[in-house]
Image (cartoon, rainbow, N blue to C red):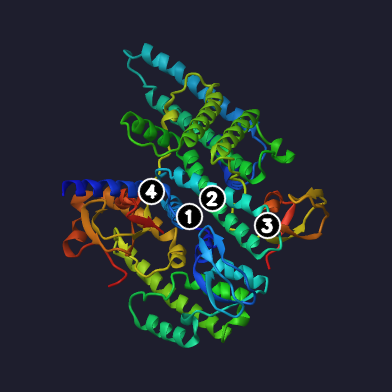
Amino acid sequence: MEDDENLHALLDTQDDEENEIELSPAVLIEVMEEAWLNEKFSPEILPNKIDFVELLLGQLSAMEENLENVGDRDIKKTLHLLEVDRLRFLVGSYLRMRLEKIEFYVDHILKQENSRLENREDLYLTEAELTFARNFKEGIDNHFEHLMRVHPTIPVDWKNQVIQPNIHSFVFSRSKTNIESIIIDEGNDDETVYVNKDSQMIISYNSVSNLVKKGDVQLV
Amino acid sequence: MFGEKAVELIKELDRCPTSLPPYNTDLVSEVNNEMRHLIESNQDDARSEEENRSLSGESLLPTIKCRHSAVIRNIRCLLAYHYNRLRVLRTMRWQFGGVLPSDIKQNLSHLEVEWLTKYSNSLAQYMRSVGEEGINLATNLKPPKSLYIEVRCLVNYGKFELNNGIVLLLKKNSRHFLPRSECEELIRQGVLEHLVS
Amino acid sequence: MDPEEVEFLGEKENVVIVPTFNYGVIHLIAGDIGPFRAGLPIKVPLWVAINLKQQQTCKIQQPDWMDVENLEVLKENEKNAITFTRMPNEHYMALTKALLKFAPDDLIRANEIRTLVKDIWDIRMSKLRSSVDLLIKEKSSYAAVDNLTILEINSVRPLLPHALDQIHRMKKLQGPQLGTNSSAGHTSSYSFRS
């Protein structure tokens, strides 16, 4: 009996692992589309999905390689190439949006990443994004330092003006599961609501940000 | 009036939100001069305020505060002017790729040129790091509709080689049916125009 | 969101085509399509259908819901309901537009379809406008927007979220003590459904 349970537990974990590695390409695309929409509508930068990006890019390269030997007039070549283009757009657009956020909120994002680092939490940025962010900050800082060098005596408060995303901004959300309680930030009063699977709401991002990161809520 | 020149800088941004007029060296240095003057006057007044503290008489404090606000406002305008120019510049980097058209390039200050080089480098470094062979994020900017699109050439561009080795002559007003991915950059640069049916 | 991006999402929807050629299974990354047998209907994503249609190698079958009779019922329902009715397809607008553009010859009574879908869209848009108006007057903090399609949601973006954000800021400044008149009578949420 006990062995049986152990065996089940073992099988379960194996299943989970396999699911993670052998995600079907169709599911992979779905995950990427969801990540794309979430990143598009979330005011803050979200935890990165680089593993999925790399997997999908791998699929695309493999496909392009296979197509090299297929004649140009073959029906399937056009369709495959068009699909590859569509997916390249998806991945590219996703990564571009992240870079745009990194540039715009660079100080804020780096601060958050540093505190995640200190608390040994997972970082939101990939290693490459982090390097890009640091370089970007360095570039901007240098630029401004140079400009202000003509005034050696002025107060340096201007360095503390950090652009932050407005996490209270309103978003459209679709729940992917039944959600027991969403706390609505009323500004002056809080309220909790129960939300059914598949229902759509317009709501403050702040109220659903954790659910978005968990994957229970999709931004649309 | 203090701060007026700085506001001119902001107005300049407002007039051309997507293009990059010549870097306004003169106006920037006028603002800097005004600031220098304000700061020096404040330092002088602060000193005499210290010395005359015991004597009854008019306090210089309101004047100092007023000048200080003007300094802060000037700083803010200067930063906004330079920051927003960098934003336009980064958008252009995405639009034109690594090489800016020379008529734009001559509008940059040398600090801006330096900044752009660094930005371009770290962007290129980032793009190389994604996936096994890197990813060019400057293409596929819009959802693809079909592999080939019809384009019209707007200038006498000259020879253009496609990935399959075919060489085309791009003459003004000539029309071509080209792979979208290969002519996207020329469209952004204004060499080709995408004809939408 | 860019309208082209909304279309991009819509192009993933499946439609039925009747190919004029024979071909084996094509293993797209998103899943297999085919085998294609001339004259035999088969389901493919819209973007594939458009591509084949452009090469004149298939006919696109009009989805059932796009029949004029069905659209008339949909329009009547939409007119009579206070809330938004559920559309037969999340991307009804993108599908209709694509078919009208790329395969008008495959549609039965194409012009009437165009008018009816436009009518339905207009009715929904006018409902949406009055709901938005009410939502803002009620100073709500959230609202259910069930049955709105992505394109419709996109049409109130970014104005509605922006307006609500401003209201939220004002409420915050007002503080808990002063906000009592709204919490006393009714809850400040408002649903597009009710």
Q: Give above or below for C181 relative to B185.
A: below
Task: Name the residue carrying label 2.
Answer: A59
| Nearer-N-terminus badge (3/2) | 2
Q: Which is more N-terminal, label 4 or label 3?
A: 4
Judge whether residue A128 can be spotted in this image.
yes
Q: Which residue is mark 4?
A: A18
Query: What residue type is disc 1 on?
Result: Pro
Q: Which sits earlier in the primary sequence, circle 1 or circle 2?
A: 1
Chain identity of mark 3: A
Q: Give the Cα distance between marks 3 and 2.
A: 17 Å
- Classify mark 1: helix, strand or loop: helix
In the rendered view, tell whether residue A125 sits above or below residue A168.
above
Instruction: State the image coordinates of residue A27 (x, y, percent, origin top left).
Output: 44, 56
Quick one: label 4 or label 1, which is nearer the N terminus?
Answer: 4
In this rendered view, identify the residue nearer to me: A4 or A215: A4
Which mark, residue A25? 1
- Which residue was labeled with disc 3? A70
Please state which of residues A34 and B98 is positioned toward the viewer in this rendering: A34
Q: In this orientation, which residue lies closer to the viewer: C92 or A73? A: A73
Instruction: Look at 51% across and 65% down and name the residue there.
Output: C12
Q: Nearer the viewer, residue A210 or A60?
A: A60
